[in-house]
Amino acid sequence: MRYWLIKSEPDVYGIDDLARDKTTPWTGVRNYQARNFMRDQMKPGDQAFYYHSNCEIPGIVGIAEVSKAAYPDATQFDRKSKYFDDKSTPDNPRWLHVDFRFAKKTPLIALDELRRHKPLAKMRVLARGNRLSITPVDPDEWKYILGLMKK
């Protein structure tokens, strides 16, 4: 099993939306590295921290689980979608996504709090200039953050 951190803006699709819907396709990712994580490494059963970004207090607010392996993102073929890609075809799709299932809401672990803990210093979400919506999380970092949630 692998561990991940997935980002979404709470006013676009927050943890409460996932809790309501129970499962969701993670559509609209248009970064090749994030796409490759989904395509090549994410497997059903993998766990992910759900992270609210671009909000008053960004941070981890829940846990989700990969519920379906990568498959073509239909938004790339929809001319009305802001994620439409005219270079992508059903025979040769550029963009894939996985489905996530709601696991649980957690106490907020704010970005500032994550930065205060030396064992988390190498987390990609803390790297200067990191804009990826999906990043791997080291198993030791995963365990450490779960410990913070229990305090």
Image (tube, rainbow, N blue to C red):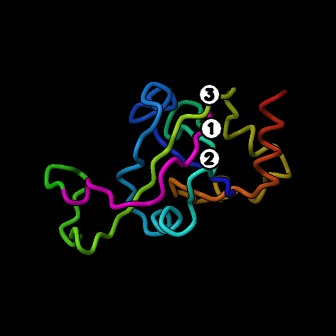
| Residue 88 x %, y % | 23, 70
In the rendered structure, which amino acid carries the disc numbered 3?
Lys
Residue at the disc numbered 2: 48
Q: Which mark is residue 63?
A: 1
Please say if the residues under marks 2 and 1 sit with CB atoms less than 8 Å apart: yes
From this viewpoint, which residue is outermost toward the left? Answer: 79
Q: Quadrant of the N terminus?
A: bottom right
The residue type indicated by label 2 comes to Ala
- Gap between marks 3 and 1, in whole Å? 6 Å
Pointer 3 residue: 105
Q: Start and end of the magenta stretch?
A: 59-77
**Residue 138: x, y in percent?**
74, 58
Where, by quadrant of the figure, is residue 71 drawn? bottom left
Looking at the rendered structure, the number of numbered marks drawn on it comes to 3
Task: For mark 2, give the secondary structure.
Answer: strand
CA distance separating discs 2 and 3: 12 Å
